[in-house]
Amino acid sequence: MADYDLTSRIAPHFDRHLVFPLLEFLQERELYANDEILKAKIQLLSHTNMVDYAMDIHKALYHTEDVPQAMVDRRVEVVARLKSLEESAAPLISFLQDANLVQELRPDRQYNIQMLQDRFQIGADQIEALYQYAKFQFECGNYSGAADYLYQYRALCTNSERSLSALWGKLAAEILMQNWDIALEELNRLKEIIDSKSFSSPLNHLQNRIWLMHWSLFIFFNHENGRNSIIDLFFQDRYLNAIQTNAPHLLRYVATAVIVNKRRRNMLKELVKVIQQEQQCYKDPITELIESLYVNYDFDGAQKKLKECEQVILNDPFLGKRVEDSNFTTVPLRDEFLENARLFIFETYCRIHRCIDISVLAEKLNLNMTHDEALVWITNLIRNSKLEAKIDAVSGTVTMPVVHQNVHEQIIEAMKNLNMRTYLLAKNITEPAQAAQASR
Amino acid sequence: MASRFWTQGGDSDTEEEEEENSEYDGSDAEQPAGDNSGAAAGSRYLRGQASDSDDSDGQHRVVKSARDKRFDEMAATVDQMKNAMKINDWVSLQESFEKINKQLEKVVRVTESVKVPNLYIKALVMLEDFLAQALANKDAKKKMSSSNAKALNSMKQKLKKNNKQYEEIIAKYREMPESEDDGTADEDEESDSEVEEDPSKIVMSDEENEDDDDDDEDGHDEATEGDGVWERKMSKKDKLMDKQFMKDPSEITWDIVNQKLKEIVAARGKKGTGRVEQVEQLTFLTRVAKTPAQKLEILFSVISSQFDINPSLLGHMPINVWKKCVGNMLLALDILEQYPNIVVDDTVEPEENETQKGADHNGTIRVWGNLVAFLDRLDSEFFKSLQCIDPYTREYVERLRDEPLFFVIAQNVQDYLERIGDFKASSKVALRRLELIYYKPQEVYDAMRKLAEQTGTEDGLGNGDESEKNLSMEENRGPPVFVSIPELVPRKPTFSESSRALVDALVSLIYSYGDERTKARAMLCDIYHHAIFDEFSIARDLLLMSHLQDGIQLMDISSQILFNRVMAQLGLCAFRAGLIQEAHGCLFELYQGGRVKELLAQGFSQNRYHEKTPEQEKAERRRQMPYHMHINLELLEATHLISAMLLEVPNMAATAYDPKRKPISKTFRRLLEVSERQTFMGPPESVRDHVMAATRALSKGDYQKAFDVISSLEIWKLLRNCDSILQMVKSKIKEEALRTYLFAFASCYDSLSLEQLTSMFDLSKAHAHSIVSKMMVMEELQASWDQPTKCLVFHNLEQTRLQSLLFQMADKLVILAENNERAFEVRTGGGLEGLPPKRREGQDYTAYGANRWQDNSASGVSQGRQGSGYGGRLGYNGRTGGSAQAGAGSRGAGGHYGSMGRTSYRATAMRASQVEGFAGMVNLSRAGRI
């Protein structure tokens, strides 16, 4: 079932630390051999400073108590570096820890720097050291510390490049601490900077957008309002282009978000277009579901795909998030997805049919229920006024009445705003003339 | 007798012999007009000279030159005679005859020979023949003017008298003109390809050079003697060269060679300098060059003078010269390979004596030259030769076989440039290579690869042609080459297994180092190549991401042609992949103006209204594609028309009574109208007829007949997997037939079962269901399924006449209101404030569009797709908001769309009026949607 696993495709767009949750998820799902994942973890850690953790994993993996010399050496090195960084950043940190002193900082950055320089002999070197120290903290896995320092660094920093990378660091730290609200704020800030900043090369710009989108997946599928935001973000032209150019696999998340989000149906048309364009590059059951439903009108195909979708969602680290509810776990997104997808299928099916056999309908909708249950389901829909239909209980069918707009209504509709337009036009023409006359 | 270098090879072995063997000379002296014997005669004379007055160099010189002069004069007179014959001018013929007789005396005196020169005999024979002919033709004789007739008569007598003296020789000549004619034949050949040389020039330089020679008196006798042996059969410069190399090699100094080089180079381009001769001189110098650097310097001069041989812009360089040039390039590369400290540079003027530094010199030696320029020139000459040669001849094929030869050079130059780290230049070379292979499908590529390998094994050299043989022959002859260079660079091109790999390698190099134009062209080639290999989506993405269609209007014409070719190929590719909409989008612009041939540079199109000036015509001729690069126009036309048919027929059926809807392909509509106007319908002949016949069948829903007509086209054989493509076409035709049928006859049905539909159009149930469902969803068809009975139930919405008239009126009112608003906008230059939302939106988009495009250019790749997704919208905005913008004269949208329009390159098209500009936008919006 690892067919549709995207981890290897999305991992390059993440920070090392952000890949951890993904690996944890994979380990839990047991899609791959445990050893493989552990090895991947060690590899991942080899460039971070979380040496202790790497050692633990190593022990677990090889069932030994020995650790390779390289790791031990690295640990010593890391500790030494931590010391030196701590020292160099000490003056500024001590300043920042004093709440009274921090009060004196003002929104004016230049003033702050000047003041620090004059009163505390804290210059550019110390500020730089703060950044390095924060980065180091992050590398060590101390995300909350890193987030704090980076926040303060941003207040003092003058270099826009540095400020940007500090922001990225802050975002990563917040994500890892699962502070979704703050992370969302940081994300929006970052997005603004990326959109307004001029990058050295278009490719660079593109890369930044793609990173942003990948990182945002963490937030959007965890934050309560994330499902709206993801559509807002991903459907912006630039971001949609970026997806199409370099990261078509993100279409899975876009498609899921659109299906799940009832209020954003209007995006569907655009989504279908994009999916159709990219079908050469990327394909998974979720996009195929949409394709067979809205391009080929192949309901049997859609039904098959729907079954596969369930597995895909369960195995996706972002979509398959579990919620422990007292005794049993559920995957809220899966249920929502299935429900909505069914509605989609049903809706489209009804649109082109005048009369449907209920048992066929139940089968098409992939509902494992009897005729009666399907009847109830449909009745509910009709009652909630989502569907204009009548059930013919004798023949066991649902009939949809055909409604056509009255010809007269159509004509009135067509000419409705002509009056207003002409009036405005006349006003616009006569007004300057009158004004001219008046002035004369 | 001009230079005789053609026979040098043969003569070289006898040189020693002749020197010692005087009897041999004597016996040969009987026929001084012959080639060898001519030399011998000269030598005998000169030998006498030498022994008489070994110190009188000047005299020696003069005599030599005088002798040649006489021959030249004589040849000139013969030419005059020929001219006179052509126009039947006996008066001047008579004069020439007298002149030649006088000259004969001089020649005989100079050569001290009893034998009359061959040239003279030939002239006599010619005259005799012509005279006989003129006398036989009584009518013509009567028509002659009196003076002419008189001259003819006197000529008759004189010639008779004169010819008596040479009866024997003439008879002999007539018997076997071939054997006797060697020398002259050679000469003729030369004079075909080269400009007449000026002997005095050479004499001058010889004399100058004599000063150098004066120093070595001791070796002089021998040297002059050697000269004597040589001079008759060798050109002047060879004479000199020989004299120089006859000396002990150690005595030739760098200075001598350098001076000589400068002298020759200075003569370049001057009037009267023989171009071929110059090449020969320089070639010789390369062999006596003292240092590798000098050799290289001379080689460069050789190459550039070889390029000079063909002065015309239209004609191409003679093929043998081209090949020699390739050989020289290889030699130059060998030198560069062996002596890495030699640097070729054309930016800095090297120091005076830079090339004096020997092979053992440490540090860099700068030599002036530009390998890339040479290579460019070679390539364009190759291209030109292919343009000129008739593609249906064997010659063309032969010429095509030289392609690997060029490839080898290009490869070596590129390797060299990469080695010295000049990636910018190497990207240019890579582009040249790319342009040789981008249009080749895998089969052709394989064939070329095989050819290259074959010839490679034959003689260990990529070509095995004349030039190399000549080269080796020259190498064998005479002096040892001072600076011998082993063949270091590979003489065989290496091709990777698949052309894709090669293209990828070249393209990635170009993308990282090339300049804008190189990159754009490489991108186009890349797209073209992808399209050939049926990778439509990749090709499309590349095209859209590169934004080439925006700027192509501003690029040079040859790139525009390339762009058009790419679009054509992309259309074909889309068609093969069954993407009808896309194929039509790519192709219809090409066919819009009816100038496909011109747009693809595959021929000329006649324009009734616009006469081309000769300059335009010439320029057009120069940019023609060689035949082997052509895209099959019939196939292209068939593709275009079939895709237009598949789109247009259902569209016509759907909108038969709806004047509002626009035709998808105006070109197709026009053709259809023309064919419908015909009184009698013959069986289809051309591609167009076939498609029209198919269209008629299809519009009745008769898919089988439509397909039969289409599949009877010949062109399908040209396609690689024609079966599967025909299958695709068949299924598309079925689909469209179904759609057309439903559109046309929906009003006649109340219900229609799915089974009936499937049996009518031979479609699977699922397929038919899917097509019909789609039509319902798109609201093209007012119907719905009845699931239990599997029936299609139509909801007929008949409008009364009054109602439909009302609709029309409503539409017209909307148009009126829009027109009013537009007029107001044009007048005021600004939009209306309180416009209804729809209109305002349009304007916003325009502004937004302009911004977005600017943004695009700033962020290139990332925004690649916008053009694709929103092309349609952009086009629309351009139309509505465009007038306002144009009024304000803003460049933003209007200018942009203009550039996006058709990629025609004629100046007339550039002057497209604003209306046309807008039309262009709309067009492109379609093309952009692919």
Image: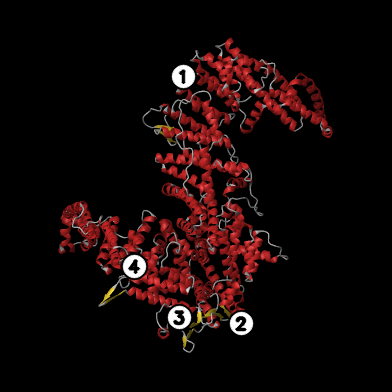
Residue named by callout 3: A361
Q: How many marks?
A: 4
What amino acid is found at the position of numbered circle 4 in the picture?
Asp
What amino acid is found at the position of numbered circle 2 in the picture?
Thr
Chain to which the residue tagged by mark 1 belongs:
B
Q: Residue at x 22, y 56 (%)?
A: A49
Q: CA distance from mark 3 to mark 1?
A: 105 Å
Q: CA distance from mark 4 to mark 3?
A: 29 Å
Same subunit under labels 1 and 4?
no
- In the rendered image, the residue lying farthest to the bottom is A394
Residue named by callout 1: B251
Mark closest to the chain's N terminus, 1 or 2 = 1
Q: Helix, strand, or loop for circle 4?
A: loop
Residue named by callout 2: B800
**In the rendering, at what x and y percent does residue B69 appear?**
64, 21
The vertical placement of A339 against B342, above or below, is below
Q: Is residue B722 visible?
A: yes
Residue named by callout 4: A316
Q: CA distance from mark 2 to mark 3?
A: 38 Å
Give B330 or B587, whichever is nearer the viewer: B330
Q: Helix, strand, or loop for circle 3?
A: helix
Mark closest to the chain's N terminus, 4 or 3 = 4
